[in-house]
Image (spheres, rainbow, N blue to C red):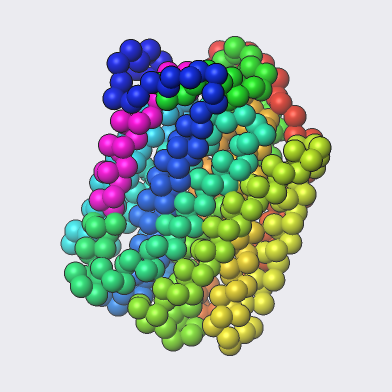
């Protein structure tokens, strides 16, 4: 059990308890690598889209079925994984999630029918739903509020690294061993991560590498009230709805980048599988930068005396404005101008996302963080799977034009921020009402 005191451990004890250790950043590194693996496993299909469509004779709507299968299952995985991790703890819950999605990703390499491939995508989505609830909860356990947006930005940058590594690794593996091996080889790294996590992760109060000084720093915020609240009872709070709305609008746009941008670049600019790597790597390199800078900017503004509300929302407004030019992408014949516009939008999304997730920790008690993130992730994935992915597949089969998808992406974040501000003008800790449900 996670709350059990560790009297003997493979980890070394910290000698000087008055010296502040920094093990929380090691934990942040583990979250970063898990998120990297998470995005590699989900992004392989985007890089291989033209290959799979040719080899397996898929239409655009067949491909959108794969995206929808993943997204809808991911929605339920996000929802229930958040609650499960709140109940069993991050050490076991997070490890189980990574182990199961690794097996599902490997299954993509088998000889599957269209329906079976969709089922494999659904299994992957269901298990991958545990990553962000688990990671955000871990940040809430290991970092005081003033450092959480930076820590979230760092681990969230793993999504960009994963998406950046995929178009580099997958063409090489596919060229030498075939596309089926690409799924198996990339997924196998998850098994290594699970072993490392189980060996080196404990909660802060139980960890032998955490000094008393570091533990005091982690706990420097006022303690949360000892209160339990039912899952659905969370929906009575404005802070929860603000996160649901923000993630429900922005998350499907990010998935549009992940699943359709590689194919768009290949089709529009005549690139082959080996040529797609450099522009996609540039896009996610910028996204990685945006994730860290977005978290750093809000943290810096807070340290300069800005209120949490002003720092978060100003940073998110800046990010939303940086997405607007993506609507110009379809009007350019320059590969690198198109790449730059998408890269700017991807960087802005990740800066937005770092602050959006951190808002949950700003407003909700630690014991509810995974559940709240799970609710928001559920809505975002359902919107993507039921509405956005089928619509994109249909519009591309009918018109072959990306004008409408890029147009929606352009203004989506501004709409989301406006709605969030109307729902939650100020970011303040929520006082929970007791619930027995």
Q: Quadrant of the C terminus?
A: top right
Which residue is drawn at the image coordinates 74% and 61% (left, top)? 321
Q: Which corner quadrant of the image does residue 324 belong to?
A: bottom right
Which span of residues is magenta-colored?
Answer: 187-207
- The percent position of residue 228, horizontal first and vertical second, equals 56, 15
Residue 265 or residue 113, whichever sits in front: 265
Q: Quadrant of the N terminus?
A: top left
Can residue 218 be seen?
Answer: yes
Can residue 52 be seen?
Answer: no
**Is residue 145 left or right of 23 when viewed as pictured?**
right
Query: Is 74 drawn above or below residue 322 in the view shown?
Result: above
Which residue is drawn at the image coordinates 53% and 43% (left, top)? 377
**Is residue 217 left or right of 269 when viewed as pictured?**
right
Which residue is drawn at the image coordinates 65% and 47% (left, top)? 296
Residue 12 or residue 239, whichever sits in front: 12
Residue 244 or residue 392, whichever sits in front: 244
- The percent position of residue 39, horizontal first and vertical second, equals 42, 54
Query: Is 123 drawn above or below residue 375 in the view shown?
Result: below
- The percent position of residue 119, horizontal first and vertical second, equals 30, 52
- The percent position of residue 163, horizontal first and vertical second, equals 44, 60
Q: Main secondary structure of the magenta part?
A: helix
Query: Is 16 drawn above or below residue 415 in the view shown?
Result: above
């Amino acid at each position: 059990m996670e709350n059990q005191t560790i009297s003997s451990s493979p980890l070394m004890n910290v000698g000087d308890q008055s010296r502040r250790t920094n093990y929380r950043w090691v934990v942040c590194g583990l979250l970063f690598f898990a998120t990297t693996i998470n995005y590699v496993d989900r992004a392989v299909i985007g890089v291989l889209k033209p290959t799979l469509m040719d080899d397996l004779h898929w239409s655009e709507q067949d491909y959108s079925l794969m995206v929808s299968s993943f997204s809808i299952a991911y929605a339920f995985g996000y929802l229930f994984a958040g609650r499960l991790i709140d109940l069993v703890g991050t050490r076991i819950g997070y490890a189980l999630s990574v182990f199961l999605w690794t097996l599902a990703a490997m299954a993509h390499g088998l000889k599957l029918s269209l329906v079976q491939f969709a089922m494999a995508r659904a299994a992957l989505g269901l298990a991958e739903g545990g990553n962000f609830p688990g990671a955000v909860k871990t940040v809430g356990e290991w970092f005081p509020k003033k450092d959480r947006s930076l820590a979230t930005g760092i681990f969230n940058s793993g999504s960009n690294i994963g998406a950046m590594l995929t178009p580099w690794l997958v063409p090489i593996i596919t060229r030498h061993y075939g596309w089926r091996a690409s799924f198996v080889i990339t997924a196998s790294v998850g098994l290594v991560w699970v072993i490392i996590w189980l060996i080196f992760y404990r909660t802060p109060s139980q960890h032998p590498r955490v000094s008393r000084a570091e533990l005091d720093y982690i706990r420097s915020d006022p303690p949360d009230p000892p209160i339990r609240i039912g899952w659905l009872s969370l929906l009575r709070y404005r802070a929860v709805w603000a996160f649901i709305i923000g993630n429900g609008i922005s998350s499907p746009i990010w998935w549009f980048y992940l699943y359709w941008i590689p194919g768009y670049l290949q089709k529009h600019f005549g690139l082959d599988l080996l040529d797609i790597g450099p522009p996609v790597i540039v896009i996610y390199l910028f996204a990685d930068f945006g994730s860290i800078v977005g978290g750093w900017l809000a943290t810096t503004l807070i340290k300069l005396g800005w209120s949490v509300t002003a720092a978060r929302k100003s940073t998110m407004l800046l990010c939303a404005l940086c997405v607007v030019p993506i609507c110009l992408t379809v009007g350019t014949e320059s590969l690198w101008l198109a790449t730059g516009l998408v890269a700017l939008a991807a960087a802005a999304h990740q800066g937005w996302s770092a602050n959006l997730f951190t808002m949950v920790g700003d407003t909700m008690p630690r014991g509810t963080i995974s559940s709240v993130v799970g609710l928001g992730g559920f809505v975002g994935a359902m919107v993507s799977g039921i509405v956005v992915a089928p619509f994109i597949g249909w519009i591309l089969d009918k018109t072959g034009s990306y004008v409408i998808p890029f147009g929606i992406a352009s203004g989506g974040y501004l709409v989301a921020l406006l709605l969030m501000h109307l729902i939650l003008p100020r970011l303040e800790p929520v006082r929970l009402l007791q619930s027995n449900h």
